[in-house]
Image (spheres, rainbow, N blue to C red):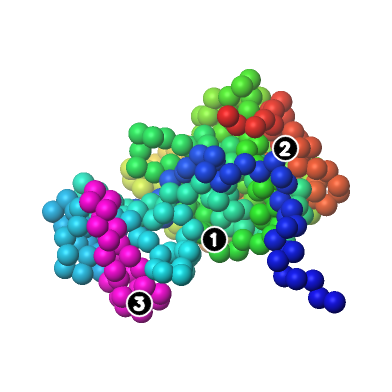
Amino acid sequence: MRLPALLLLLLPVWPLRVPAAEEAPVIRVAISRGSPSLNIKTSPRLYVREVSTGQKYMLLENSAYELRPANGGISVAGQQLSSPIELLPGEGERYVRLGKHVYKGSIFILAMKDRTLDVIERLSLEDYLYGVLPAEMSPDWPLEALRAQAVASRTYALKQMNPQQDYDVTDGVEAQVYGGINGINPKIKEAVDSTRGEVLTYRGKLITAFFHSCCGGHTASASSAWGEPVVRPLKGVRDPYCRHSSHYSWEYFVADQDLLRLVQSTGSTALKVRDIRSYRKDGSGRTVTFKVRTDKGSFLLKAADVRRRFGTFDFKSTLITRIRKVRGGYEFYGRGWGHGVGMCQDGAKVMAQRGKNYKRILHFYYPGADIKDYE
Ligand SMILES: [Zn+2]
């Protein structure tokens, strides 16, 4: 006999202690900023609501609209509306689709003073985390690693909340990657829901729970990475877990000409680079400054600037183990991927595979931190 379908609704899929969604704080995510205009292609119809008057306008389905800043407001299909406006899903729809992404929260478009448009999504912090986890960690990773990521990401997001600004976080790698509701699966929901409200604190204060792809054997201190006041959980630990990560070691070739151009961009008149080496290293072994010898003397370059210049996807870290002069340039050898502060995601995955739960993982990467429910 088949069970009536309704019975499924009675199964307690998530822990019962989950409070109502509206109890979670609301976070504002900048989906895009500084656009001179926005092109919206509707597939189902959308509504535009002028927030100041509550007046609603319909955008026809399967149509293209251009939104432009105009006289401090926003022009939509020739109609001048005051800023901000909200995009609302059409009848029978729950989400707003913008480009490749689908959003569950409220989408606001703001006209900025510099005659550009910002798109901001407002949604509950827990819904936001559903969208962060699949973008920051693969949804098929072990549940305990995903739980650790959920707590770190929740803590990080809460720490970024700033009522003085129009938004709290961006959706890119400079904050934590967020892609709307794309990629959510039951495991992601379980990781977020089963840790609901849990955050990392030190001496009663939220820590800035940084994380990164792979530390290369030792996580970095937040102070040497960017001058974050050093609290004990962000001082860096030796990590034996990420050794077999595909990001554990890397090499990258920098051509003589490219290195010379970088030196010249600092104002030097040098015409030839003679040598580059790590000049100052921090306690984790990461290079803080490089010393470049040229025909016009020696210069110090910040390692973080060098990494940015050559691209953080290729020049994967500042944990440089060797620099070798080769024909036409220099071969940089390094370990790990990312800034190296806080939780090493590849290490967290291995800890989870070896049976460690998310609390053990978090206590390992943020030593001395407490895991608490936020108020
Ligand atoms: Zn690691």
Packing grade of label 3 (10 A; few <14, some 14-19, many >=20) is few
- The disc, 1 or 3, on the residue closer to the chain's N-terminal end is 3
Q: Which residue is mark 2?
A: 362
Residue 346 picture location, percent across and down: 72, 51
Q: Residue at x 80, y 43 (%)?
A: 357
Question: Mark 1 and mark 3: span between their CA atoms?
Answer: 21 Å
Question: Mark 1 and mark 2: span between their CA atoms?
Answer: 26 Å
The quarter of the picture where residue 48 lies is: bottom left
Question: Mark 3 and mark 2: span between their CA atoms?
Answer: 47 Å
Q: Amino acid at mark 1?
A: Ile
Left or right side of 265 for 293: right
Left or right side of 258 for 73: left
Q: Secondary structure at mark 3?
A: loop
Q: Residue at x 65, y 36 (%)?
A: 198
Packing grade of label 2 (10 A; few <14, some 14-19, many >=20) is many
| Residue placed most toward the observer, 269 or 49 | 49
Range covered by the magenta-colored residues = 37-65
